[in-house]
Amino acid sequence: MKQLTVLGGSAAGVGTGQGCSGYLIQTENTNLVLDLGPGTLLELRKHADFRKLDAVVISHLHMDHILDVFALRFALAYNPIQPPKPVPLFLPPGGLEFMQKAANLWAGPEEEADYFSAVFDMSEYDPATEIEIGDFTLRFAPTAHIVPCWAIRVVSRDGSDDLFYSADSGVDGDLDELARGAAVAIVEAAMPPDSDPDQIRALHYTPQQAAQLAERAGARNLILTHIWEETDPMKQAAAAREHFTGRMTIAFPGVTATW
């Protein structure tokens, strides 16, 4: 059995009851995290040992998707129970330079060289190739966003249905092929239906478009995510409901889906 646990599903800023994007995917043998936005490490610790993650994979370098990687660095470096080995951290292209700039800002004297590498086994993934992590193989596709960003398909090695994560994308991103056949689709829906059409094309889906993507993919479960609480997530879900025939859930910490 595979299980998704939502660590956070707010849009670019944390809500009153949840952090931003973060998703834990587990089998009996594998603990994989997709994105680790602000406020998600707290939820992660409820469901997995942060010292023994098989990998953290980052879709893009916006703070609402990566900020708690820095909180995780401190947890790994200073917790009295130390991790058995560095946690694999897969970054998008440009990620290593990004992390070095962060080390330059925060590291103490003589710490910069291994500020992150002491606790993370860091590498940049090539979005044109697959990476293997425990029981899963990951594939990528570029999205339409303000910075380079990659949607992620998590494929189970046992051949069963699997999971699609849209990351952040406007509808100009062609994600249908990557999403096709996924058992679970985590799709962002940050834009209310009456948003600027240019922003919908270039930045974020509306709830209706998120539902239509999941329906075209044939997904059984849709997790609507990246929604501001100020736009009334229940209202956004109602707008999406008529476009999706499967099970639909709003992302909130602790929400799960199994397949």
Image (tube, grey):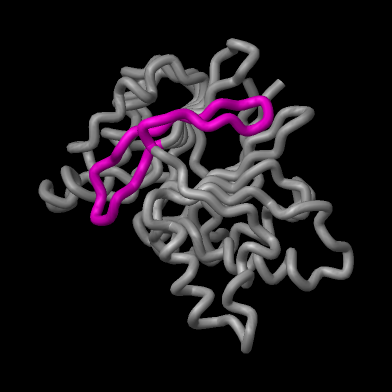
Between 229 and 137, which is closer to the camera in this rendering? Answer: 137
Residue 14: x and y in percent read 49, 65
176 is higher (above) or lower (below) than 194:
above
For residue 250, above or below residue 163: below
In the rendered structure, the answer to whether residue 159 lies left or right of residue 205 reads: right
Q: Residue furthest right?
A: 81
Whether residue 84 sits left or right of residue 117 in the image: it is right
Q: Give the residue at x 59% y 81%.
A: 107
Residue farthest along the top direction in this orientation: 159
In this rendering, does residue 22 appear at all? Answer: no
User: Measured from the top left, where is residue 112 in percent x and y?
Assistant: 58, 77
Which residue appears at 74% of the width and 69% of the height? 77
In which quadrant of the rendered image does the N terminus lie? Answer: top right
In the rendered structure, does residue 131 fall within the stretch colored magenta?
yes
Q: Which portion, as a residue range, is magenta?
A: 127-151
192 relative to 26 in the view: left or right: left
Taking the spot 30% from the left edge, 38% from the top edge, the residue there is 142
